[in-house]
Image (cartoon, rainbow, N blue to C red):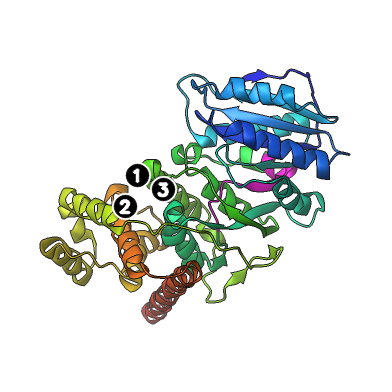
Amino acid sequence: MKIINPSGIKKADLIIGIPSHNENKGIGFVVKEISSGLKKYFSDKKSVIVNVDNNSVDGTKEIFLKSSSDLTAKNISFIYCSTPKNIKGKGYNLRNLFKIIKKFKAVAGATFDADLKSITPLWVKKLISPVLSKKYDFVFPYYARLENDAVITNHLVYPFIYGFLNLDIRQPIGGEFAFSGRLANDFLNLNWSKTDYQFGVDIFLGLSSYFLGAKICQVNLGKKIHKSSLPNLDCMFNQVTESLLNVILRNKSKIKLTSKIQDIPILGGGKLPQVSDIKPNFEIYEKMFFDGIKNHERDIDMLPSQIARRISDMYVKRKMKIDGKLWSEIMYYLMTKPILSGSLPKVSMDFLRCLFFGRVGTFFEETLNFTPSQTEKAIRDEAEMVLKFFRAKLKAQSVKLKRKA
């Protein structure tokens, strides 16, 4: 990795990473807010802000370095670090961050997306303080988000880990999190898969911290506003899903199948502000659903016959309706059941993604006239539905195995 270390600093208490790839429009603001937070709340600590970049060509590096020179403050240093020219992926950036944390022997680290518009100096305090207090090793963010920005969280990762792992972590793939220096070193020693080096890194690190036995919590940051992730949704879905399934399969022996939800503490309380949002256009997802089914008609037979018939009928009649119950069944048969058998799903991620688009589009159509609080309740109800269905299937499977024995 290429490093520019203007001050020549070699040791630090806190290291804050900003992963980026062509983020010249937002990174200056994020650097300014982080620097203000460190100056206001952690002036007694030696801190470093690191731009862990993917060799951006839009001037991200130059803006970061200029911002750092404009924000000179006692005990705050700046480092620019980049992957080689042809290496891209958020996971590569965060792995470089962990290497720097290990080298500098920092006691705590955190990461913030480079396109944040809602970050404030208080975010820095809220994320890092639980780690510095030594009460927690890993801190998940907890915030309100725009509906169209959080579809993978709301309709895949959150309900899946709620129903299968019984973990109530509302933002398991949020880009902002904090961790201890020890945990950063543990992350380096993990077995990283291909998608963990890409968009799958957030769920990989979050669930790995849980499986490593780290003390975890959530912290209320209010609301998160950043640029839309819709243009990257296809590759993001595939990479996040593969990393999610990989990390669970690797740690299958540590999973305790139970019906009791593990409530993860939310520091700062669970009440969130309302986020003004334009209702997403469900027809965009409807088109992606039907286009996907057209290209994966043979894959439909991988589903149980009664579900396969329903999907085929939707395609023939051009009537999309994947409600919460049907989506629970799809996730169980295509994701959970293979893992319970000790293998990764055989279904293609592209086919699973088009079914996911069907669920997202159906949800947006169902909640078209909902308020933000009603929509949030519907998302949580969906997670409860997944839990209920998974619980019933796992209980039935347990009884069946006992009878065979």
Q: Residue at x 43, y 78 (%)?
A: 395
Q: Nearer the viewer, residue 163 or 317?
A: 317
The magenta stretch is: 171-184
Look at the numbered disc 1 and give the secondary structure of its residue. Answer: helix
Q: Is 16 left, or right, of 159 in this rendering?
A: right
Query: Could you say which disc has been placed on residue 35 in the image?
Result: none
Inspect the image, locate mark 3, and give the three-letter code of the amino acid beneath it: Glu
The residue beneath circle 2 is: 353
On the image, the x and y values in percent for residue 216 come to 67, 58
The residue beneath circle 3 is: 242
> Badges 1 and 3: C-beta atoms under 8 Å apart?
no
Q: Residues within 10 Å of mark 1 (few under 14, many from 20)?
A: some
Inspect the image, locate mark 2, and give the three-letter code of the amino acid beneath it: Arg
Residue 11 is a magenta residue: no
Query: Could you say which disc has been placed on residue 234 in the image?
Result: 1
On the image, the x and y values in percent for residue 350 come to 29, 48
Look at the numbered disc 2 and give the secondary structure of its residue. Answer: helix
Inspect the image, locate mark 1, and give the three-letter code of the amino acid beneath it: Asp
On the image, the x and y values in percent for residue 162 come to 50, 67
Please determine whether, in this image, residue 315 is positioned above or below residue 239: below
